[in-house]
Image (cartoon, rainbow, N blue to C red):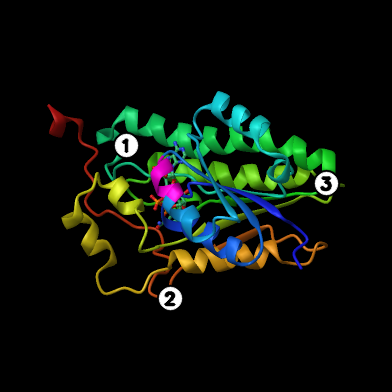
Amino acid sequence: MNHYKVVLVTGASAGFGYEICRLLAKNGFLVIATARRKERLNELAKEYPDSIFPYALDVRDNDSIRNLIESLPEKLSSIDILVNNAGLALGVEKAQNSSLENWKTMIDTNILGVVQMTKAVLPIMITRNCGYIINIGSIAGSLPYIGSTVYGASKAFVEQFSKNLRCDTAGTAIKVTVIKPGLCQDTEFSYVRLNGDKEKVAPIYANTQSILPEDIASTVLWLAKGPMHLNINEIEMMPVCQTYGGPSVTRNVSFDLTDKD
Ligand SMILES: NC(=O)c1ccc[n+]([C@@H]2O[C@H](COP(=O)([O-])OP(=O)(O)OC[C@H]3O[C@@H](n4cnc5c(N)ncnc54)[C@H](OP(=O)(O)O)[C@@H]3O)[C@@H](O)[C@H]2O)c1
């Protein structure tokens, strides 16, 4: 028996979101599956037509979010769990070489999208004193690496936003968790990041066993079925083949201005 019933998942057309929807539907939840690609959501819903309800949604578009929340049928209107999963990285270039447009898209999706979804759904949870917000962050939010300038910073936002929400909802039954995965395979993430270039994507996963979307889905299910008095603040996970790198040192750095003339 699940305490929670209705779950809204963003980014449900691929990767983590797709598997989260499938596993939650299989375990008795009613799932509002959202993403921009409606045809992918329709495919997803075919497997569980009585439990998965597809809705096209761009998390950057606040009017669409408000319209969706206001037009949900009665049986889906009391959202118990919001999984803020939609997100993306664009490019691996250093800050000085990266595109401002890419940066803006990441900020709009990973930060504004999470903020707008939360702002739309939290009042429903507050009114009912029942709700759980599960945000998908990343290890990139706390572990800096080259080419992650804005992506990593956007995920740092997700982490701090999640923890600050815990402060704001103190005294209510509402729960908040941030999940911070490391390297994950079998999603579209790296294809999106590298503009669909398969030759660049393949080496990232060569000879590794990385986290699978199913691993993220089973973590979300475990959280969703956990005891009501317990809040897991954050979960950081990596595949065994990945670990911390430590600070790096560059030798022979030149400070001579004449070098640049
Ligand atoms: N894969 C990894 O290694 C990894 C590691 C740590 C954290 N993460 C995070 O985990 C989350 C899911 O990643 P994933 O690996 O499953 O990636 P994915 O396979 O590329 O899936 C991303 C999902 O987000 C949706 N999306 C993108 N922009 C959107 C927008 N503006 N509005 C609504 N939906 C949007 C996509 O659907 P549409 O294109 O149909 O809209 C897709 O369903 C992301 O937040 C990512 O940052 C991933």
Hey, which quadrant is residue 248 in on the image?
A: bottom left
Q: Earlier in the sequence, mark 1 or mark 2?
A: 1
- Disc 1 or disc 2, which is closer to the eye? 2
Q: Judge by depth and name the residue closer to the eye, 31 or 196.
A: 31
Q: Where residue 53 appears, x then y in whole percent?
A: 56, 48
Label 1 SS: helix
Residue furthest toward the top?
63
What residue is shown at x 70% (from left), y 45% (from top)?
79
Q: Amino acid at mark 3?
A: Ala
Q: Residues within 10 Å of mark 2 (few under 14, many from 20)?
A: few
Rounded to the nearest angstrom, the CA distance separating label 1 from label 3 is: 38 Å
Distance from disc 3 to disc 2, alpha carbons, whole Å, reads: 35 Å
Q: Is residue 85 magenta?
A: no
Magenta highlight range? 37-42
Q: Marks 1 and 2, how far apart in space?
A: 30 Å
Tell me if 57 is positioned left or right of 82 in this view: left
Q: Residue at x 20, y 36 (%)?
A: 256
For disc 3, the neighbor class at 10 Å (few under 14, some 14 to 19, many from 20) is: few
Say which of 43 and 202 sits in front: 43
The residue drawn where x is 47% and y is 31% is: 108
Nearer the observer, 235 or 75: 75
- Mark 1, residue position: 95
Q: Which mark is residue 170?
A: 3
